[in-house]
């Protein structure tokens, strides 16, 4: 995994082969697998971001969200 400057990964989160740009926050028990997360994005507690997903800058993924593989989310979006 590649973790950008200022990023925070909270307790029991799993990061496997993901790229997190700057100032990303990953919530408790979230799972990110082989995905890309843009600057200043927030991944809520217990969320699942699977392989091939691309999350734009300034995106909020709410608690418990489960994305499908290959999902693309535009910048400045809340899911």
Image (cartoon, helix red, strand yellow):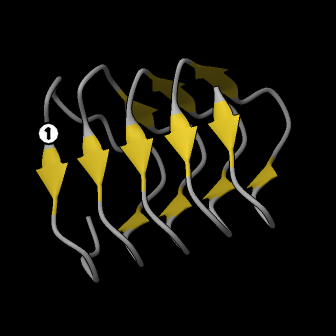
Residue 1 position by quadrant: top right
Total labels: the figure holds 1
- Tell me: 36 left or right of 42: left
Residue 74 coordinates in the image, percent (x, y): 16, 68
Rendered view: 27 above or below 40:
above
Quadrant of the rendering where the C terminus is positioned: bottom left
**Residue 32 shown left or right of residue 73 in the figure:** right
Which residue does the numbered mark 1 point to in the structure image?
Answer: 71
User: Most extreme residue toward the right, as rendered?
Assistant: 11
Which residue is at 28% across, 83% downward?
A: 76
Query: Height in image: 54 above or below 43?
Result: above
The residue closer to the viewer here, 66 or 51, is 51
Q: Is residue 26 left or right of residue 54?
A: right
* Quarter occupied by residue 62: bottom left
User: Residue at image x 85%, y 36%?
Assistant: 11
| Crowd class of label 1 (few under 14; some 14 to 19; many from 20; radius 10 Å) | some
Residue 18, image x and y in percent? Answer: 51, 29
Task: Specify the quadrant of the image occupied by residue 36.
Answer: top left
**Image height of 58 relative to 67, above or below:** below
Query: 71 above or below 1?
Result: below
The residue drawn where x is 29% and y is 74% is 78
Residue placed furthest toward the bottom: 76
Q: 46 or 8: nearer the eye?
A: 8
Q: Callout 1: helix, strand or loop?
A: loop
């Amino acid at each position: 995994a590649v973790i950008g400057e200022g990023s925070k990964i909270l307790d029991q989160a799993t990061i496997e082969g993901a790229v997190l740009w700057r100032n990303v926050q990953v919530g408790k028990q979230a799972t990110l697998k082989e995905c890309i997360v843009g600057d200043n994005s927030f991944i809520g507690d217990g969320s699942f971001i699977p392989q091939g997903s691309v999350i734009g800058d300034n995106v909020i993924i709410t608690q418990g969200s489960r994305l499908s593989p290959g999902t693309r989310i535009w910048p400045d979006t809340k899911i």
